[in-house]
Image (cartoon, rainbow, N blue to C red):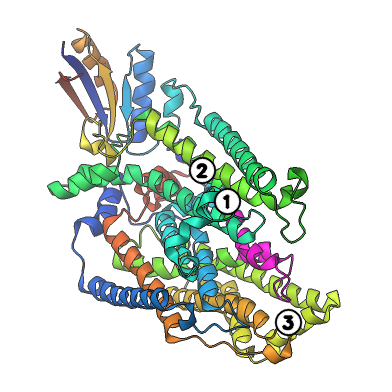
Amino acid sequence: MANKFLHAIYDDDDKLLDAVKLLKKEGVTIEDVFTPFPVHGLDHLLDLKPTRLAINAFIYGCLGLTVGLLMINYIMIVDWPQNIGGKPSFSLLENLPAFVPVIFELTVFFTAHLMVITFYLRSRLWPFKKAENPIPETTDDKFLIQIRINKNEKDLKAKVKKTDIFKIDVVENNDE
Amino acid sequence: MGSHYEAPIRKPLVTGNKTYHQISVDVARPIEGTANKQWWIVFSIALVLFMWGIGCIIYTISTGIGVWGLNKTVGWAWDITNFVWWVGIGHAGTLISAVLLLFRQKWRMGINRSAEAMTIFSVIQAGLFPLIHMGRPWLAYWIVPIPNQFGSLWVNFNSPLLWDVFAISTYLTVSLVFWWTGLLPDFAMIRDRAVKPFQKKIYSLVSFGWSGRAKDWQRFEEVSLVLAGLATPLVLSVHTIVSFDFATSVIPGWHTTIFPPYFVAGAIFSGFAMVQTLLIVMRKVCNLEDYITLQHIELMNIVIMITGSIVGCAYITELFIAWYSGVEYEQYAFLNRATGPYWWAYWAMMTCNVFSPQFMWFKKLRTSIVFSFVISIVVNIGMWFERFVIIVTSLHRDYLPSSWTMFSPSFIDIGIFLGTIGFFFVLFLLYSRTFPVIAQAEVKTILKSSGDNYKKIRDKDGK
């Protein structure tokens, strides 16, 4: 069955926020909102769960730290200890100060890259990915609320018209 | 409007009565238009320099490092000077986008994109020098920790040179993903405006299908914040580790504990100067005076003044500590710097880096575009001399007076340096015509709080 959507388009971020508030009060389920820039407070209004990317980043950092420590311990202490400038090369703990820079860099490296990769995967962003914003203007100056229509088109339209709207579109797409 | 309140005393950061759409138009204009004559002229010059540099690099690698002006006493000179100079310049980008993001400084938004581009391009130049100095760059992979069979040993994790490898490569790649993630919404804007099919295809490819969902923006902001939090200690660590290349040695003049903070301050100083140089030209050429305003230039001048003064304090501290340490070698190294045969380099450094930024105390001078441009060039030159002074004057008179000597660069040394300047400008000029040079999505978020038209409305309403 084809999906039918109502696209409520606004030309201002404050109008969008007011509209989201009003539509929520009216009991309309908002499926998605497309904006050209981050509109502050929108995620709270839409009851989006806080993202867990920062927690992920922390875990990735711990991973980087562990990998760095294990790698250096294996290379410098276990596998081939050498006397370099009289440094204590037979004890990880005693030689640790000299290893701090690389372990730190590896921690940052793992955190940053794995977090960004997680973000790209979760938000489905990669080269050759087709953009999904319904109208191209949402990356310029238009703000779009997408609402799914289930035989209540008239009622929805009436509710949306109460907001400070720029334009209403009804679209059907078959490919989903 | 109430939620966009900003104290009236703060100067507007976006001028010219912009609307959201106008911002898109202004940012897309240099990409959608064609290059003018000046662009082609500057690009050609940069390209010729770059080609000349490539020639010199090929000559160096095929003949040997002997074609440089190095000698037995001064085994490190222009290559490492240029390396540190470029890495230093590469510090402002991440500083502007990361540290100023953490401090919620809105003025970063007009300049962060270009500053980050500058960072990436200059770190690429920096990376070339150690690569060439290896002599056999095709063995460059020996610096990564690979098992024994490839060579006879593992890499040495006690060595600051290896720390540098990790620091610079982490810095380059993290800066790159930070930059690119921020670019996605702006590439998407260009993509959605594009009318030419080829342009549309390219910008669809590079924008990774960015759609601007509310959830995407929430993640985007979280990622930006965490990356900024990571990049801040990272940027400080990188130049700290670069300074360790010298500070962990036992050469008088290098063996000082003040090096890490002193190098970091110097890096921010030179980086901001380079941003100033580039943006003063770019705002004019790309008609971006409404986004990179006089206010931005003034604030950057203040940063230049402060970091220049920190660098000045470091120079004086070094002199004082050399005397106070009672170590005669240390004392001689600094006396030789200021009064020896390289006195002119030392005083050029002092004049350019310590004296010239003090003009920025005067509001009239720091708000003059021509003056700011001149000072930014002077600072760039001064910071090059700083590295030259630290490196060459500490080496050329070592413990054995019979080996005392002078260093003079060969035309190959000069050619490679000019080549990297050419390469840098080739990259930057290409960037300025193909990338959204202003972080337009971010600028749109501050339009209502910091745009001049909205500020006027608020002033009139008295709230």
| CA separation in Å, label 2 and label 1 | 10 Å
Where residue B167 sits: x, y (%)? 56, 54
The numbered mark, 1 or 3, whose residue comes first in the sequence reads 1
Query: What is the secondary structure assignment of the residue under circle 2?
Result: helix
Up-down: is B342 above or below B51? below
The numbered mark, 2 or 1, whose residue comes first in the sequence reads 2
Where residue B22 sits: x, y (%)? 27, 50
**Label annotation for residue B227:** 2
**Label annotation for residue B234:** 1
Residue B308: say if magenta: no
Q: Can residue A42 be seen in the rendering of this structure?
A: yes
Where residue B256 sits: x, y (%)? 74, 68
Tell whether label 3 touches label 1 (CB within 8 Å). Answer: no
Residue at horizontal 22 percent and vertical 16 percent from the top:
A157
Q: Which residue is tagged 3?
A: B334
Callout 3, which amino acid? Phe
Magenta stretch? B236-265
